[in-house]
Amino acid sequence: MISQPTWHLPIGRLFRAIIGSKFVPTTIIAIALSGCASTLNIPKPDTGAFHPLPNLEASTVSVPVSIDLTSIFRDIEKAVPAGDKASAAYRVVEKNTLGDVGLRYEIWRNPLQFSARGNTLNVGGRVFYWFELAQNVTKPIIGGSFWQPVGSCGKGEPPREALVGLETRVSWRDDWRLQSKTSVLPTQFPNKCTITFLNIDVTKKVSEAFSDGLIKGAALADSRLAQFANVRGFGETGWKYLLEPIMLDSGIWLVTNPSGAFAGPVRGSGQTVSATVGFTAFPEIVFGDRPEVEPSPLPPLRTSAPAEGFHITIQGELTYDDATRQLARTLVGEHYTIAGHHIEIVDIKVYGGEDMMVVEANLKGDVVGTVYCVGRPDFDAGTNRLIVRDLDYSVDTKNVLVNVADWLSHDDLRNTIAEKAEWYLSDQIASIRETIAKGLNRKFAPNIAMSGSVTAIRPAGLFTTPTSFVARVVADGAVRLDIK
């Protein structure tokens, strides 16, 4: 019996023979090679600590207030006498060795004029006068006496002039009232009478002619201003309406967030004084259901200079979960060939850190594991997109790829992720300018109207939170409340 020969072939040669056969299915080759894929073990990037979102920009809502002083001015005009008319007879004002010294005069004024500069109100008048002094002289022989003029001014020549008036300084109190302090101004004599006879100061008569009336006018001005200049009603009305959210459109609300109150300087024109009473606020646009607001009392009135203009903050938010879902739709399940090697993205995740964005891609194929790309998130206001700038592999990812899968460190995969990493935010941000302008111009009541305009829309930054990216734009403009 002839025995069959026994073939001894090393297992390595047998394996090479099998996989070298053109008849072996490629699936068997893939199974055989699957154990040769490189495994990536890359630590997650350090995302740092999150910073709180910056405060909203301070804004002002102005409420112009005008106070008509016509009635106060009219009463002061009545309180100050028109002058002191001359009499035909001399009035004895002094005696000397020759006898009586007499004085006669006439004093009159023009209508009082009102003016204002800064927080100072003035009521002033131009006074005209003439004086004549005479000595009472005894007639010799026949007896009796007569008045012999010894000096005059403003008589037989243009009358002399003087200036009289009141000065009122006004300031705001924190209880929403305008307080005042009025004083009588010293009488001014631009061309003072220079008659000197027995040391008689004839110009004193000019001051005395109006002093009582001016003192009365000063007291009247303070009491009437205290009565007229109580603007708390304006403040309470304005505060009430600013606390309420304003619906700009369906699901879009303007929340004013008033925080304080201020009063600007008092200015006068004609017989009217005016000032801007207003509110500081931190307005923002809120999307969704009507926001809940907490009632609060009218704050004290401050005179500190507020920020100028109205700045409405609009926030668009993209959660990390939404960003992940949107990017996964374009990348997960895609196959890529890089330098002759094959990979597939089987999962992807997007999240943020301290001023950074991380894209975490889970791969299989010729490498198995997770790579990390990091970049700087930014908001492109022109296209209303959240984008990522300078996206690159993390430092640890680069270090591992150099040693394990250098071919993957090429830009192909990173560029693909960078091209797809963009997200459109709500179209409401792009069209918010017209919506705000419409919402700012409205009537709350027959005597209360708001008016405003938007002058510019500007990006205010892209921020990261523990759960989302937040894009901010700011609408700049002005707004006022008119309360009648």
Image (cartoon, rainbow, N blue to C red):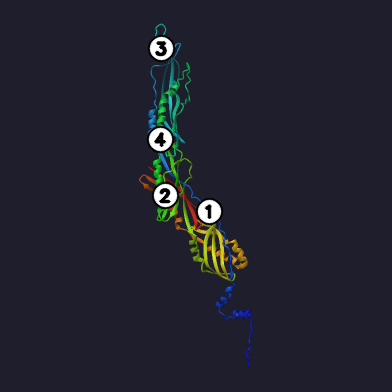
Q: How crowded is mark 2: few (under 14 residues within 10 Å), some or many (20 or more)?
A: few
| Residue 282 as seen in the image, left or right of residue 407 | left
Res. 263 visible in picture: no
Cα distance in 3D space between marks 4 and 3: 55 Å
Q: How crowded is mark 3: few (under 14 residues within 10 Å), some or many (20 or more)?
A: few
Q: Quadrant of residue 341?
A: bottom right
Q: Nearer the viewer, mark 3 or mark 2?
A: 2
Mark nearer the N terminus (4 vs 3): 3
Residues at discs 4 and 3 in contact (Cβ within 8 Å) = no
Cα distance in 3D space between marks 1 and 4: 50 Å
Q: Mark 4 points at which residue?
A: 226
Q: Nearer the viewer, mark 4 or mark 2?
A: 2
Mark nearer the N terminus (4 vs 2): 4
Q: Position of residue 321 (x, y in %)?
A: 49, 61
Cα distance in 3D space between marks 4 and 2: 33 Å
Helix, strand or loop status at disc 1: loop
Q: Quadrant of residue 448?
A: top left
Helix, strand or loop status at disc 2: loop
Mark nearer the N terminus (1 vs 4): 1
Q: Where is residue 368 in the image (x, y as percent from the top left)?
A: 57, 69
Q: Mark 2 points at which residue?
A: 294
Q: Mark 1 points at which residue?
A: 51
Q: Is residue 177 above or below residue 312?
A: above
Q: What residue type is labelled 1?
A: His
Residue 59 versus residue 71: which sits nearer the camera? 59
Q: Mark 3 points at which residue?
A: 146
Q: Pick out the residue farthest to the left.
A: 446
Cα distance in 3D space between marks 3 and 1: 100 Å
Q: What residue type is labelled 4?
A: Ala
Q: Where is residue 357 in the image (x, y as percent from the top left)?
A: 54, 59
Residues at discs 3 and 1 in contact (Cβ within 8 Å) = no
Q: Which of marks 4 and 3 is in front?
A: 4
